[in-house]
Amino acid sequence: MLKIGLFTFGGGYAMIALLENEFVVKKKWLDSEEFMDMVAISESTPGPIAVNAATYIGYKTGKVFGSVVSTLGVCIPSFVIIYLISLFFNRFLEIEWVGKAFKGIQACVIFLILSAGIKMFVKLPKTPFNIILLSATVCCTVLFSLFAVDFSSVFYILISAVLGVAVYLVRFLSVKNKERDGKKKK
Amino acid sequence: MIYLKLFLTFLKIGLFTFGGGYGMISLIREECLSNCWLTESELLNFIAVAESTPGPIAVNMATFVGSAQGGFAGALVATAGVVLPSFVIILAIAAALKNILKFGGVKAALEGVRPAIVGLITATAVVMLLGTVFGIEKADGVFAFDYKSLIVLAVLALVFALYKRIRKKNISPVLLIILSGILGVILF
């Protein structure tokens, strides 16, 4: 697990292929169906995918102790590297050309975030519910930030979860009603 | 108590981050800016570092902010905070609640969250774009257009599109970061 933590550049999705190779092909700790389950669970629950995956695999192979060890394993390399960087980072930025380079890099990061958003949008099923919620979130966030209204992202997430459940319930009830109507007609 | 505050803030971030990596950017940005832990440009610098070093971005960000605010102990509590919610939730799912994700209500809630996450990421990028490149932070603020950043963006978009055309896959973010660094040295 330490090795996985050390070699996953650029976050979650990069490591999935690596994990599969390590645990399904080489070590045979999981079969590929279990592995797919794990990926689905890691993606749909909160938290970084790498951490979720580590905890899950750890539990499957070594129960609670295994999950503690593998979660620590996946976090320690990043922790050490970033801690060391954080000690020198500001001094590093004071070097003239480094500062300049980072001005360019800032634009790049915005580009990366934007393209991540677009990529996720392409994958998102284009149901009316998704489209409305998505555009409402974008509009509200941008406007609120421009007019300095304080409104936490947490609320968007909670509201959309509640809406998701509400739509589900409405659909569920209407299906039941239809069934009942069908029976009455007979 | 800075340690407690770091721990609780990152606990919240860990709990409300869906879909990995960029899903957490909007929440991190909000918390760091409102607590005055980082400025917008420090945040952007650091996202670049988190992206080009190994490990999950969430853990990298937590360690960095924690270390800047509270030294080694700060880094430790912030990282623990961001990891703990995932750890507990996954442990519960793996151990006992194997079928919770198949239950309609839970699934519906998670499906509902997805468009909001995509929206938040996109909106965060737009807000950062307005703030950094166009100099608009508030609706009544002054307008300070930064054409150099726009040039960098244009070049990146071009390279991104060309690479996709020719190699049929996405260019690695690390390569883009290096390229933009070089552009930065030339332009600024």
Image (cartoon, coloured by chain):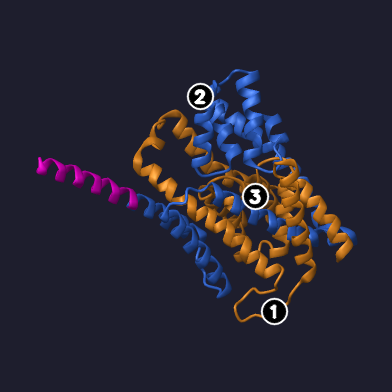
Chain colours: A blue, B orange
Give the spatial CA distance, label 1 vs label 2. 55 Å
Q: Amino acid at mark 1?
A: Phe
- Residue shown at 33%/53% (left/top)? A166
Q: Amino acid at mark 2?
A: Glu
Residue A30: name its quadrant: top right
Residue B19: name its quadrant: top right
Mark 2 burial class by Cα count in 10 Å: few <14, some 14-19, many 20+? few
| Badge nearest the viewer, 3 or 1 | 1
Q: In this picture, is A136 found above or below A26?
A: below
Q: Nearer the viewer, residue A160 or B175?
A: B175
- Residue shown at 62%/33% (left/top)? A16
At numbered mark 3, what does the secondary structure look like: helix, strand or loop?
helix
Which badge, 3 or 1, is on the more N-terminal residue? 3
Q: Amino acid at mark 3?
A: Ala
Chain label for disc 3:
B
Chain label for disc 2:
A
Whether label 1 touches label 2, CB < 8 Å = no
Q: Which mark is residue A33?
A: 2
- Residue shown at 52%/29% (left/top)? A36
Mark 3 burial class by Cα count in 10 Å: few <14, some 14-19, many 20+? many
Chain label for disc 1:
B
Percent from the top left, x then y, of residue A104? 80, 60
At numbered mark 2, what does the secondary structure look like: helix, strand or loop?
helix
Residue on which disc 1 sits: B143
Percent from the top left, x then y, of residue A110? 69, 59
Q: Nearer the viewer, residue B36 or A135?
A: A135
Q: Which mark is residue B62?
A: 3
| Badge nearest the viewer, 2 or 3 | 2
